Amino acid sequence: MRRIVRIAAWLYALAVYGFIFLPVIVLVLFSLQATSFPIPPFTGPSLRWYQAVLSDTRLTSALVNSLAVAILSSAAAVTLGFLSAWGFARFTLPSSTLLRGLITLPLTVSYLIIGMGLLVLFNWAGLPKSLLAAGIGHVVINLPLCFAIIYSQMGDHQINIERAARDLGAPEWKVLLLITVPVMAPAIFAGFFLSMTFSWDEFVISFLLTRFDTTLPVEIWNLLRSGLNPKTNAVGSLVFAVSIVLVVLFELTLLRRTPA
Amino acid sequence: MSTVTNSGRALPRAGRALPWALVTPALGWTLLFFVLPFIAMGFSSLTAHDGGGFTLANYSQFFTDPSYWRAMVNSLQVTAIVTVVSVLLAYPFAWILAEQVPERWQRLALMLAVLPFWTSYVVRSYSWLLVLAQNGVINRTLTGLGLVGEPLQLANTRFATVTGFVHFFVMLLTLTIFANLKQLSPSYRKAAADLGAGPVRTFLHVVLPLTLPGIMVGAFLTFVLCIGDYITPQILGGNNELLMPQLVMMQIGRRGDFPLASALSIILMAVVTVAYLACARWLKIERA
Amino acid sequence: MSAQTTNPLSILKRHLRTACAATALLLAAGSAQAADLNALIWCDHADPALLQPFEEANGVKVNVKEFEGTGAGLAIVEQSQPGDWDVMVIDSIDVPRGVEKGLFEPLPEDKLPLADLFPQVKMDGSTVVGGKRYGITEKFGYNTIGFNKTKVDPADMQSLAALTSDKYKGKIAIYDYYLPVIGMAALAIGKKTAELTEADLPAIKAELLKMKANAKLVGEVTASQTALATGEVDILVGGGEWVTAGLAKENPALDFSIPKEGAVLWSQSLTMFKDSKNKDMALKFIQYIMSPEGQARLATSSCYWGMPSNTKAALTDDQKKTLRFDEQPDFLARAQSYPAPNADLDKKMQDVWTEMLQAQ
């Protein structure tokens, strides 16, 4: 009986793994296609589509844009999120529950609606579309996330360390920089990293709010709209590779930071 | 902040200025770039596309034109199917990872399970198109093995849209449910066993109820992300039906009709709010 | 090609070095530099093979923004600051809409190769308003029946009735753009595309629903191209040389016909903005696109192919054959104009289209 359960469990897990990996395998395989259509039969391997991606300035500059937007907007989101989490966790503020609710509210709203709202607002205010506008949108979606992560990790033992520092005469800014930030580093880092991921992969807000210079997902969308070719596979595989490297780096740093 | 440097020596009762200085930037950002846009969208939804004053025409269009509210019905159907299927697929998978996989391999197994998460989101749907196409991998395999005579129509259908969504949300839900299962103290299960409950009853009466909040959080996330997504149905659905986000984007893309797009967004938002209220009690953010 | 000889790594490195510059760019984004040319375009103009020669020859950067329908394009302009845009690509038939809004600058006829254009596509009825020329047709083609000649009977493709017959049920894709396909539905029921009114919509809708019942998908440029090229469908409603020509290399079995009821002529024009801060460069750009070299590059652009409006376009014989260059006089004689509804009818047409998409 236990044996049967075990075998069934393994079969099930294998099937789900298969389902999860099927599109990735197809994506990567046909990025190596030698002919112009990324469908069977496989005609590769060939690296011509990778070359095409790397020599396409629109794609490469979109990649740089995406990185810049992801880093800057995540830094802003994590800073605002950290400061407010600290404020709410350490001090009693009037109608704190309501205000915390307000900060986390964007988590429950679709990106499309956030993008639409900003589009209407910026139009109305006469602000031009730009990467900056998209970055502002990315802070809106990531700030509640950073806040929630950091706030949930602010426990009592950290309060005690801070109190000890204050007792020793440390001014508030020193407590913040030398005690709170290092102690909260894993949560801050997790917030930053998650924000990076979401910003890096976000489409609809960037699509609605940018004009000439745009982010990689939007440029991939444009590429997709202009014809089906293995170049899309190649750029997708490259993004996948870059993301994996980032994840592994993150895992390594986090593992190093977390005491066993 | 310099004004309060020394006041908080013993306890964090640092006057009123410091705490407000800490929380105001985040609150201000949320008000300025989240609440205000929402208000602007509300006003916009009450104006006519070709200028002119107050009108409810954008809302009445939605409620009176069957092809418009059909989009909402489609969206709700697709989202409901996706949420249920994803939970049903992910729960046993997360359980296997948490219970059947040896402890030392769990981290790796979980990492592998969410690895495709890191392919670009636009590209993920596109990959499914390649998989499901008439001459795609699945159809080639099925016809090659002689299982079907004619290739099946998989791409450009609701089935394709649902598959694309389920793929993403199985990964997401596996993460949240796995975390939930790991938080369960083994002593609960032991206690249930000591009281004579078999594995099935232990699962039904102990494990499942205790993991339900985690499932609800995941299901709600699935709902919000799924109902607002434009890319997946646009790439995989073949426009054989429209979902709400497609209808919204159509107003902007084809005619630049912001008022109608705003009205449709607000209606979509209202539906999400109802869903939020329905699962609100599971969604509280608590401090550790 | 230089792309083949350049080391990808060095290109990547160069771009990483510009990462810092991108930060500054992010802050300055929105206000494009004076030396840039800002163009509101369709995807065929985004092809580097078309833009780079111009950018290099004139030391200018061409910023492009793609848009879908004229309504959306005009909305983008209205939401911008005056002077943000220099040139725009627009349906020839819609040039008057921009002129009405006071957006466009008259073009100097003596500096443009008007005499070399196919006379039928000059479309002076739309491109000339109040005696002044505001637009010049740069590219044209047909929304008609695109098909795979090895899979369907080419004789059937001589009538639009084939699109609603049971014979090709499930073998059809519909191009997802409402104006030309509504035009084709109008032709199918014997209406003139130039004279459509609201009263024609019910009959047109019925025709569209019949097509939808036969269709496997309704797709944008890529989706419909792909479906046809990969054998997912055999017929594309609204297709034409813009689908089949670009794919001729991959799939030489693709062809198009002008059925006996006629076809819809699409035609895109170049216009210049009245508030452009860079009118000299804008004119140079238009002159470049209209030149034989520019015309050849535009006609064979990576997004979609199309007939160059300039008869002197520097196309190779193979390219001309693919585009069926020599058959144009006959095609043009049988083609009807693109539907040009006013704002009200436009909205109603889109609602009909939405209904068609939602029909099960």
Image: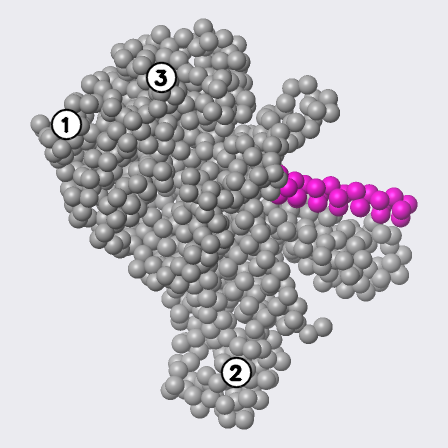
Of circles 3 and 1, the one toward us is 3
* Magenta span contains residue C144: no
Q: Look at the picture and state if B41 lies above or below C341.
A: below
How far apart are the two marked residues, 2 and 1, measured between alpha carbons?
71 Å
Residue A258: percent from left, percent from top = 66, 72
Question: Which residue occupies the foreground of this view, A57 or C341?
Answer: A57
> Could one spot residue C209 in this view of the protein?
no
> Could one spot residue C61 in this view of the protein?
yes
Please determine if labels 3 and 1 lie on a single subunit.
yes
Q: Quadrant of residue C16?
A: bottom left
Q: Look at the picture and state if B261 lies above or below B30.
A: above
Kindly report the secondary structure that dominates the magenta region of the rendered protein: helix
Identify the residue under disc 1.
C128
Q: Chain of mark 2?
A: A
Image position of A44 (left or right of C162): right
Residue C219: percent from left, percent from top = 46, 28
Question: Which residue occupies the foreground of this view, C318 or B123?
Answer: C318
Magenta residues (range): A1-26
